[in-house]
Image (cartoon, rainbow, N blue to C red):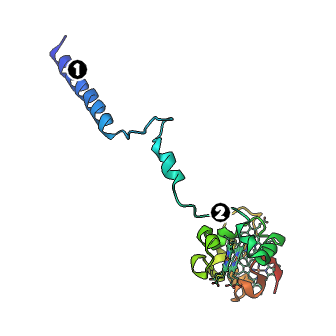
Amino acid sequence: MPPQMTRLMYIFGLLIALYVVVRWVAKPESFYWYGHYRGAALAEIAGLEIEHSPPGACSDCHSDKAAENRAGPHSSTSCQTCHGAGEAHVNEPTAANIALPVVSETCVLCHERNHARPDWFPQVKSRAHSSGMACDECHLVHNPGEFQ
Ligand code: HEC
Ligand code: HEC
Ligand code: HEC
Ligand code: HEC
């Protein structure tokens, strides 16, 4: 065997040894308990605090808003889409632990005309459409198909 082959074999041997050592040091203990992921991650994720309430949780106390929402074009838009995660508020309702979105920022998030949105989705050029008025001066916030 030519001498350069022996040297190459040493190098490959070293690389394989390095791989074995790094794998032994770096592999988390629970890797491959169940599959190609860290088994302990399951318990960690299950232990995370729940932030969102199940759909319908808000209507127990805000049945008026829920009824408006259900009757209008936003019936498929969940309360928590606009009001943010609500589990803390559901468990202990105060005004401080739920977001009260600002109308002038909220509606345009979804409805400002944007060519990246599908054509079927209702969009407006808000400046021209609302002529400087706030959206809720005409539309009801929780049933925007109806007008003030
Ligand atoms: C157990 C009853 C209860 C549930 C369930 C509940 N709320 Fe409330 N909510 C209240 C009460 C009571 C207040 C008034 C708190 C105050 O003014 O101190 C309130 C106030 C609010 C406010 C006004 C906050 C402000 O800054 O004025 C919003 C918005 C709100 N809730 C949204 C929600 C949403 C969204 C959900 C579902 C994720 C929800 N609530 C579920 C009882 C509830
Ligand atoms: C499209 C966004 C959107 C959705 C969906 C939505 N809200 Fe609201 N909600 C708002 C905005 C914006 C305000 C603030 C209105 C204002 O400032 O007058 C508000 C205000 C409120 C308030 C305070 C009302 C008041 O008069 O003080 C409550 C309570 C509330 N929403 C409950 C709900 C519940 C319950 C649902 C689901 C059934 C829901 N909202 C769905 C945008 C939304
Ligand atoms: C999270 C995204 C979102 C936000 C925020 C939002 N909307 Fe909507 N809106 C929708 C969706 C989804 C529909 C239903 C579209 C459909 O299925 O045709 C809709 C429908 C509507 C419609 C009915 C349009 C039609 O001709 O059918 C109006 C009007 C409207 N929204 C006004 C508002 C106003 C006013 C606000 C602010 C208070 C608002 N929207 C905030 C998502 C949103
Ligand atoms: C001066 C009253 C007025 C104001 C302010 C207003 N709207 Fe409207 N909006 C209307 C009327 C009336 C309609 C239904 C007739 C039409 O399509 O023009 C409508 C329709 C819509 C539609 C449905 C458009 C479609 O193509 O189906 C959306 C979305 C909408 N408005 C969003 C908004 C948003 C977002 C704001 C705030 C930036 C807003 N509107 C402010 C009166 C108003």
**Is residue 125 at least partly visible in the picture?**
no
Above or below residue 77? Residue 133 is below
Total label count? 2
Figure quadrant of residue 50: bottom right
Q: Which residue is mark 1?
A: 9
Residue with the most extreme front position:
92
Image location of residue 6, percent across then percent down: 18, 17
- Asked whether, in this view, residue 71 is left or right of residue 80, the answer is right
Measure the alpha-carbon separation of dots 2 and 1. 56 Å
Residue with the most extreme top position:
1
Image region (quadrant) for ligand 3: bottom right
Whether the residues at callouts 2 and 1 have beta carbons within 8 Å, the answer is no
Closer to the camera in the image, 74 or 135: 74
Name the kind of residue labelled 1 in the image.
Answer: Met
For marks 2 and 1, give the one nearer the viewer: 1
Instruction: Identify the element where label 2 is drawn.
Output: loop
Residue with the most extreme left position:
3
Above or below residue 78? Residue 104 is below
- Asked whether, in this view, residue 100 is left or right of residue 124, the answer is left
Image location of residue 136, percent across then percent down: 73, 84
Name the kind of residue labelled 2 in the image.
Answer: Ala
The crowd level at tag 1 (other Cα within 10 Å; few <14, some 14-19, many 20+) is few
Instruction: Identify the element where label 1 is drawn.
Output: helix
Q: Which residue is mark 2?
A: 116
Closer to the camera in the image, 104 or 85: 85
